[in-house]
Image (cartoon, rainbow, N blue to C red):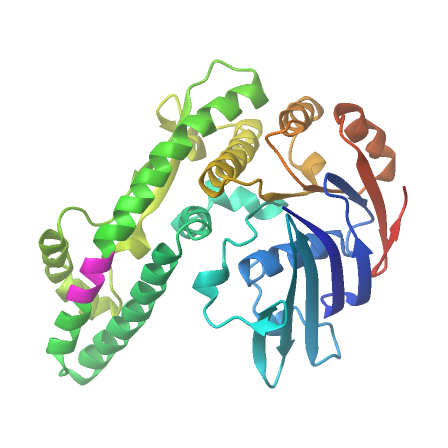
Amino acid sequence: MHISKLKLTNFKNYSFADISFSSGYNLITGKNGEGKTNLLDAIYFLCMTKSYFHYSEKNVVKLDANFFRIEGHFEDSNESKVVCKYRLDGGKVFEVNDKEIGRYSHYIGTFPVVMIAPNDIHLIEEGSEERRKFIDTSICQVDMHYLQALNAYNKLLKQRNSILRQINRNQSGQYDLVDYYTHQMAALCVDIIAKRAEFTTQVSAGFDRIYDTITESREVAGCNYFPNVKGTEVEIISEFKAALRKDLILERTTRGIHRDDLEFLLHGEPVKRIGSQGQIKSAIFAAKLAQYQWLSEKKAELPILLLDDIFDKLDHDRVGKVLQLIDTADYGQIFITDTYADRNREILSYLHKPVSQYQVEAGGIHVRT
């Protein structure tokens, strides 16, 4: 599976772009701010129905425009035309072969994707939200029921927090509603925790293997999942109820799967605490490529891999190891961006499959080879 064509209208800095891609490597060069990353984000948007960078739809509309449109043609044994249309005054619509998508949970995962970008340093160094996103964007692409459960939980969480605020500020309220949301959320926690734990166990081995390849080290790498609540549904309900007084004071739910965390380890110690910059960056690549391999096994097809400015994240030797790692039949369509055209020779020296090259200049893109 690969994306063969991409058309953009008023997407970020692109007034219009129409480009065809190779099913193998696509090497995109251009100066900072010209739109290399925006191309990758457009592809990610078509696969996951949203931007990789937490942008709301209104923030990716080109300045002075009131809409954007993304069109992509995906090919395997058949061709699928996917279109995302967004208007500031009308909201977002997704279509596949001219038919509107009713539920995104039924669509996400149709075209699996993994992206590695400079801000992924947050995966190691920042709070738990980024690591939960890493888990969730993986599982959601293979299990629509997980995504539905996660969406239902987040809706209940918002409602429970609203009731907590009302009770605390009015010194009265509907405690029965709090109890209702607690029971509903606890039931969802059981399945979500089980699937997150299974994912972590399966990805950990790949993370260790890939980290060792990138670093040529004897360090033992892995990852651990830390659920915020544990046990049966009844036990989880008890944990929620035990925290109710604190929840009322803080006006938010302090227990639940929205507080889970994932920890990346070297020799059993957190990479965040003991890792050098080189080890942290290597761990990010190992985690994302382990995610890629997990998706390819679960989906029985090769996801699209989006690599944004990899030379800015790893030293020369480790970049070489990553490129050698992905230059195999285990990886499908790959996009690589880089700021400096003269570094293309270094990238190309590691790759044996055909490479198509593109140059981005001021919101336009030109085929180089």
52 up-or-down from 204: above or below: below
Q: Residue at x 14, y 81 (%)?
A: 174
One can see residue 34 in this view: no
Q: Position of residue 52 (x, y in %)?
A: 57, 56
Is 302 placed left or right of 223 in the picture? Answer: right
Q: Position of residue 346 (x, y in %)?
A: 80, 27
207 up-or-down from 153: above or below: above
Q: Which residue is outermost to the front?
A: 77
Q: Residue at x 58, y 72 (%)?
A: 99
Q: Residue at x 77, y 44 (%)?
A: 22
One can see residue 224 in this view: yes
Tell me where residue 319 sits by quadrant. top right
Tell how many labels: 0
Tell me where residue 38 sits by quadrant. bottom right
Image quadrant in which the C terminus is located: top right
182 up-or-down from 65: above or below: above
Is 354 placed left or right of 58 in the picture? Answer: right
State the predominant SS element of the stretch in magenta.
helix
Is 288 placed left or right of 336 in the picture? Answer: left
Q: Which residues are magenta?
A: 183-188
Q: Position of residue 211 (x, y in %)?
A: 51, 25
In the image, residue 284 lies in the stretch drawn in magenta: no
Residue in front for this viewpoint, 363 or 22: 22
Q: Position of residue 25 (x, y in %)?
A: 74, 38
In the image, residue 185 lies in the stretch drawn in magenta: yes
27 up-or-down from 236: above or below: above
Q: Which residue is outermost to the top?
A: 218
